[in-house]
Structures are given as structure tokens and as C-alpha cells.
Amino acid sequence: MIYQTDVAKAIIEAGANTAVSERRFLELEIARWKKSPVRKTMLDGERYHNGDHDILQRKRKAIGRDGKLQEVDNLPNNRIVDNQYAKMVEQKVNYILGKPLTIETKNKTYLEALKKIFNKKMHRKLKRLAENCIDGGIAWLYPYYAADGTLAFRVFPGYEILPFWKDAEHTELDYAVRLYEVEAYEGETLKIIEKVEVYKPTGIERYILQNGSLIDDVENPSSAYLIIEDEEGNVSGLNWERIPLIPFKYNNKEQPLLKRVKTLQDGINTMLSDFENNMQEDSRNTILVIKNYDGTNLGEFRHNLATYGAVKVKTVDGADGGVDTLEVKVNADNYKAIVEIFKKALIENAMGYDAKDDKLSGNPNQMNILSMYSDIELDANGIETEFQASFEELLWFINTHLANTGVGDFFDEEVTFTFDRTILMNESEAIMNCKNSVGILSDETIIGEHPWVTDVAQELERIRKQRESEMDEYQNLFGKKPNDDPDDGGDDQSPGGDQAE
């Protein structure tokens, strides 16, 4: 028994000596995360969205005298970016969030409170959140109180947040680390400072990352999430019951869109750049064959051919001399075909749609239009599923805010967020279908499907007022209401005012 106790004590002591402190653990995890492929892909997503593609760093190379590639600076080196990736990202964002969210709940007070929060400014923020989400696979929404005491939200891109999840499905946070850069002057020198914020249930811990070590941020010390100052100047801190970081995912694997299409985007840029290079190489369109001169080794031959556009050859008897030409033609159709193949493949892999599709030529029917939208509709359904789950978590913070500010307790109220998709349609066909549905469906349902109607309730109210106005005009003109009974004892007069026989 004594031996087993000593062994257990030794194991515990050895574990305590080898265990790292919490701060050191964060330092190691941040260093590993900064160099991780996951974060690099997130940064590449935003970089490509902004037009900073790999082609912009490309160097023109040719085979050197030793037969190996070497950089050359006497040849055209165009770097063309045809940013189809950014087009796909913005296409998806505007397809699913081009229109404001439709919010439905039975409690009118709750509905009005939600509409004040989900205003136009919030709609713009949700679109930016969706862009970061698609670029990085995941983005974060941070609820906080502004200086005037109103509930506000801030968007954090995925490459700023290192999450520590409680579960393998990544649904609940244990805590999270935010790494971001700020500019500051040290004397007269502008420097980049890396700051770190650790979000825990107990509040925010703030550090400065310097040479891989976390140093307490003296200018902005650790604090609670909510700082309250009363009339007497006393300051106190309060914390949310949950960590105020809400993940919004592009898909359940948190995989950025760029991972699907980067090679295709790079291929488009390369083909366009090479085509312009070849068109500008006027002296390279013709290769000179110089006869009766000494030959060279293969490495020098390739070097002269690529660099000077000329080669020296030697005949057997050395009698023939002169200069011949070998014309090299640039076939534009080949480049055009390859670029079109790349663009089509990029659209399919990105699950977008081609607005210039042949299906839209002439007067397309609605089935052709829906067929064009089939891929992006599937992708949008996946995005909406992830966003709906995030909205449930967001509502907890909103409901807590409304309860704390005395608006009401709405935790048990059901809310539905509807994403109104932005989709083309054949209006003539849709209007004809609405007309043919009269007498079969209710007016409210028909009006809701009409392409010119944006607010069903408002349109129904306009129809009601229009009918009332028509009834008043009829009464003033004929002296009776349209549903008056001619035998009810009232005056029955003709439109001319004469007594009817």
C-alpha cells in the first residue's frame, strides 16, 4: 500500500512538473494556429475576394544555359486577374440576403422590437457576415453594448478567432481567442501590434502578443463583458450567461468556397496572362534560323531560343548561308476555348449560376430559369440551415437584452426568419398563373405570388381602400349602394334621374 501511494504521488508530481500553464498553453496554440493550413485558407479567401491573386506574384521564367528554369526580365510578364471567385461570393450573398429578412411572430410587441434591431444597418452587417462566412468557412457575430447603451453587433472574420469547442460537432464554445492587428506609433515609427482577447464565461482577458509571449495589455485591461456606471460614478461589471460569440458557418465542415475553385481561378488568370504575353511578343512570333554558323549545346540552344528568338545551325559543307524564318502563330480560339471551359467548371464547382446561359435566350420559360438556379438553390439551402441555427443562438442574446431593458419576456415566443431569395422569373408567365388561379385560391395567396407585390398585407389594404372608394363613387353617382335592393322601399331612379317605370 505504501509503495502504491508513493508511485501515485510520484506520477502526480511528475505530471504537475511537465504541465504547462494556461497562458503558455495559449501562446503555443496561437503560434500553431497562425501557421496552420486552415487559417491560411481563410486569409486566402479574403485575399482572393479583394483581387489579390497568386498570379500577381508570378515571375516570367525560361530555360537557362544549364537547362534549368531561371527568371528573365526581357520578356512580357502580364499578370491579369479575372476575378470570377469574387463574382461567385457576391452572387451567393445577394441571392440569399439581397432582400431584408422576413420576420414572423404572433406577439406584435415582440415583432416591433425585432424589427428595430433587424433594421437596414443590421441587414448590411448580415451581408458582410455572409461574405466573411463564405470566404473563411466560418465568421462570428459579437453582441455588445455601445456607448449609448444600445445593443450592437460586430462581425469578426474567421481568421481572427481561434475557437475551443466543447463538442466534436462544434456547436458549443468552451472559450475562444481573438487575434487581431492594430497600428500604433512608437515615437515617430508606425508599428503593427498584435493584440489577443480571450473570451471566457468570466469575461474578456486582454493581452499583447510580443515575440510569441502574452503580455498583459495595460492600456486596455481585462474586464467583464458589460461595464455599468451609475449616477454616482461607481463602476461595476456584468457578464452574459453565455460566451457572446455566435458562429455563422458556410457549411457543416466550415470549408471556405475558395478551396473548391482556387485552381480553376488560377487557371483562368494564367491563360489570360499567357495569351497577352504571346500577343505582345512580336519578336517571338518569328524564330530566326541562321545557317552556316557554329552550333551550341542544348542548354544554350534553349536559352537563345527563349531569350533572343534565334538559333544558330551549321550545315555539313558549310556552303549554305542566309536567314530563314519559322513563324509561330498564336491561335486565339484555343485560349478562348480553354478559358470558357475553366469558367464553366468554376461556376459548377462553386454551385453558382451563369446569367448569360443559353437557356435565357429569347423568352425562357420558368422551368428553364429554375433549372439554371438549381445549383445555387441547393447551396443556399445549406447556408440557410446553418444560419437558422445561428439565429436561434442570436435570439437568446436579443431576448436577454429585451428582458433586461423592460420591453418584455419573449423567451417562449416562436420566431420565424425567412430568407427571400433573389431570383429571375418570367413575369408574364407568373401573372398568367395568378390570373388562372382566381376562384381556386384565396386572394391573399394569389397576391403573394404576384411578381409586382413586395408586401402582401399592404397590397390587401390598398385593394380594400380601392373597393371602398369605388363603392362611394357608385353611391354618389346612382344614389344607392351596389348591393341595395330595388324593392326595399328606397327610391329607384334611373341614371338620368327620371322615375323608372
Image (cartoon, grey):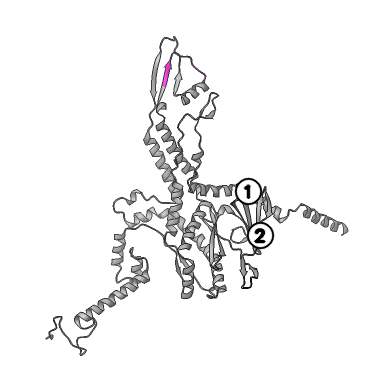
Relative image position of residue 364 (x, y in whole percent): 31, 54
Mark 1: few, some, or many residues within 10 Å (few <14, many ≥20)? few
* Relative height, residue 412 to residue 309 (above, below): below
Relative image position of residue 184 (x, y in whole percent): 60, 51
Residue 107 visible to an observer of this rendering = no
| Residue 221: image tag | 2
Question: Which residue is outermost to the front?
Answer: 188
Residue sitting at x 46%, y 72%: 112
Relative image position of residue 467 (x, y in whole percent): 28, 76
Q: Main secondary structure of the magenta part?
A: loop
Q: Is residue 3 left or right of residue 435?
A: right
| Residue 187: image tag | 1
Quadrant that contains the N terminus:
bottom right
* Relative height, residue 295 to residue 92 (above, below): above
The earlier-in-sequence mark between 2 and 1 is 1
Q: Secondary structure at mark 2?
A: loop
Give, as a three-letter code, the residue at label 2: Pro
Nearer mark to the viewer, of 2 and 1: 1
Q: Is residue 158 left or right of residue 25?
A: left
CA gap, disc 2 and disc 1: 22 Å
Residue sitting at x 60%, y 62%: 172
Residue sitting at x 29%, y 54%: 363
Q: Is residue 289 magenta?
A: yes
Relative image position of residue 259 (x, y in whole percent): 52, 47
| Residue 267: image tag | none
Q: Which residues are magenta?
A: 288-297
Residue 340 visible to an observer of this rendering = yes
Question: Which residue is outermost to the right?
Answer: 2
Give, as a three-letter code, the residue at label 1: Gly
Quadrant that contains the C terminus:
bottom left
